[in-house]
Image (tube, helix red, strand yellow):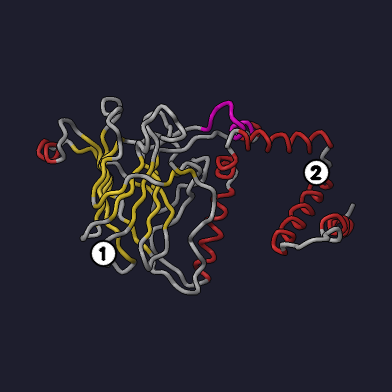
Amino acid sequence: MNRQEINELVKKMNVDTATGDVDARVQQVVVRLVSDLFQAIEDLDLSATEVWKGLEYFTDAGKANELGLLAAGLGLEHYLDLRADEADAKAGVLGGTPRTIEGPLYVAGAPESVGFARMDDGTETDKIPTLFIEGTVTDTDGNIIEGAKVEIWHANSLGNYSFFDKSQSDFNLRRTIISDQDGHYTAQTTLPVGYGCPPEGTTQFVLDKLGRHGNRPSHVHYFVSAPGYRKLTTQFNIEGDQYLWDDFAFATRDGLVATAIDITDEAEIARRGLNKAFKHITFNIQLVKEQVQAPSTEVDRRRASA
């Protein structure tokens, strides 16, 4: 079939058959995507077996809860960021800390504190260096933002995230820090490592077929929000990781690379209440003021909650 014949067929099956109330937006999206799928079947001469194997794959990926991981791995989530960047630019929204992907591993409800939080439960202090992350939340003119909500989460020394990894304590390496009167936040935690897709999982299955690895560099996720400002979804990747600019999820962006500095000064170690050297990262955050005509930065998606 040619495209006109396909469009007519899809319309006949999915538009002309309607006898009840129609959600016009859903109908528009379904008709377009089904038409594109039919065209791809024609162009690629997909067999019935290949089509059904594709459907079986998505069934398996859904059961494994890996569709969010697949969206990152195939670049869909990064592409949505690029579209959001373009929409912001057209609306005159410029500056601020760059956005990047959320990923599939956020959990709502992390413990909240003002100014400082210890994120780790202490079970890995002998395995991996202690890390202090500090920064100041300001607007794009450098004005301090007190009371900003800084949500932070990252993986443990095995590349696993609490809640999804049942061996970890509740909210391990997950905290919400409210910026203090100086706009400052400090997180005491452990140095995260990168992770790889489950080697026998559905996402890595596709990546293997594409000749691609499924590894992420060491990174830390953020949601940052404050009244009157646009919510920021971002993360920093840590300099020196072999996958820094080879992130399978395409999340590394200019302005989002952090350097972990070794702190060996005994006085500073003592001031932090430690007895050995630690790592330190500075990650300052600039929020953009909300604008009436600007596209929303809120993304309505299903997220875990504990």
115 in the magenta segment: no
Q: Earlier in the sequence, mark 2 or mark 1?
A: 2
x, y percent for residue 293: 50, 74
Q: Residue furthest front?
A: 20
199 in the magenta segment: yes
Which residue is label 2 attached to? Answer: 44
Write down the region rendered in magenta: 197-206
Report the front residue among 132 and 214. Answer: 132
Which residue is label 1 attached to? Answer: 144
In this rendering, is residue 9 above or below 128? Answer: below
| Residue at (48% x, 43% y) in the render | 304
Q: Label 1 is placed on what type of residue?
A: Ile
User: Residue 77 got which mark?
Assistant: none
Q: Residue furthest bottom?
A: 292
In this rendering, is residue 194 above or below 139? Answer: above
Secondary structure, mark 2, is: helix
Circles 2 and 1 in contact, beta carbons < 8 Å: no
Report the front residue among 87 and 213. Answer: 87
Q: Is residue 299 left or right of residue 268?
A: right
